[in-house]
Image: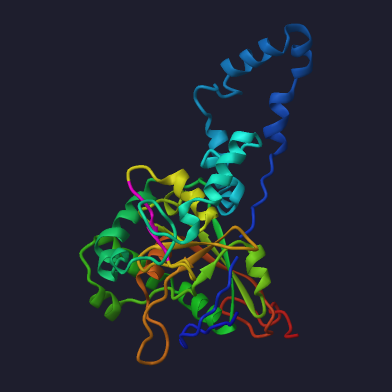
Amino acid sequence: MSHKKPRTGRRDDEHGLTSPQHTLTARQTAAPAAGLTGLQASAGNAAVVQMLRQAGHLGDERRPSVQRAQEENPQDHLTQEYWEGKAGVGGKDKESAGKRAAMRTGSGQKGKKGKGGSGGRGASGDRRTMDQIVTETGPALLRELETKDPSAGQLQLYRSMSWGEAESILSYWGDADARAALTEYVRTGTGTSAELKKSHTGLTVGAHLGDQGQADRYYSEVQLRFVLKPGAHELLFTPEYMALGPGYKTDLIRTAQERDSTFKAASQNEGTLPGYIGVKAEHTEPYSIGIAQGNTSRKGGRELGPSQLLFQLFLDRVELVKNKTGKPLPGETESAAEPAA
């Protein structure tokens, strides 16, 4: 696969995501454990469980506790096992195995497009324009994100890229005023794509992101981490904001998430659809996130596209992971950059 600098318009199919580590403090674990052995000996396990539940140390099985919700790892959304579980086919029993086999050989896997099918290319009529993102989809997303718990988990995506693309992304992200102005412009819902293009700039990230295992396969110059806002993953994997490419792995998401609305079809090869965040089923890793690119500008670079703007609204921060070029990037000292091989 080739790499691209953001202003040249060349493709760069990199990927990237890792699971953050979760630890418990001594205070969290020591208090409930104190005296537990003695209580079990004198009162029995059932009585101990009941006393702990009444005291608030255990959640009631009929009312999931806050702690259980917090324990779900956002990174699991990039695994096949997670979506098999959500789709109701994750068991090891024969019935679950039969359901998985049926999904793998269903009509959606043969490239057919139909109601609920995931094969084929995304229809041009399904794409969203920049005006729709500015006036409708973007403001709605920002309102939903504001309702999320600030302590909620945050999905991390990775992308390996050329030094030039990384320099462009980090330079833009370092301009907090420009980012805030763009977000506020979208928040009002009264703007236009023409005015946005004239007065604002955005994050022209390349076409594919994923977990860190994917990104490492394509790492030759720079790798960046893209951290979504708290709870944003709960919105990302819904028909309102996501389009799905063909395949068994993406049909798992479709089965798990479709309720009152259906997912639009992303392109078969790239897993993208303008105005949506696409998902592509991969052979070596379960999924990659597809970002439809903007038009080529007169100067030879790329203009901000509807999918790129939508993705930026999901983002909380962008971080440098590693740089082997020997050339420092914005916010990085020259001594911190790895020497070129």
* Residue 149 in view in this figure: no
User: At x 65% / y 74%, what residue is drawn?
Assistant: 218
Residue 247 as seen in the image, left or right of residue 26: left
Residue 29 as seen in the image, left or right of residue 178: right
- Magenta includes 233? no
Residue 316 as seen in the image, left or right of residue 187: right
User: At x 66% / y 37%, what residue is drawn?
Assistant: 92
- The image quarter containing residue 48 is top right
Image coordinates of residue 316 in percent, x first then y, are: 47, 60
Which is more toward the observer, 29 or 148?
148
* Residue 147 in view in this figure: yes
Which is more toward the observer, 87 or 294?
87
Image coordinates of residue 158 in percent, x first then y, are: 58, 66
- Magenta includes 264? yes
Which residue sits furthest left?
190
User: At x 42% / y 87%, what residue is drawn?
Assistant: 301
Image coordinates of residue 252 in percent, x first then y, are: 51, 48
Q: Main secondary structure of the magenta part?
A: loop
Q: What residue span does the magenta drawing correspond to?
A: 261-266
Which residue sits furthest bottom?
299
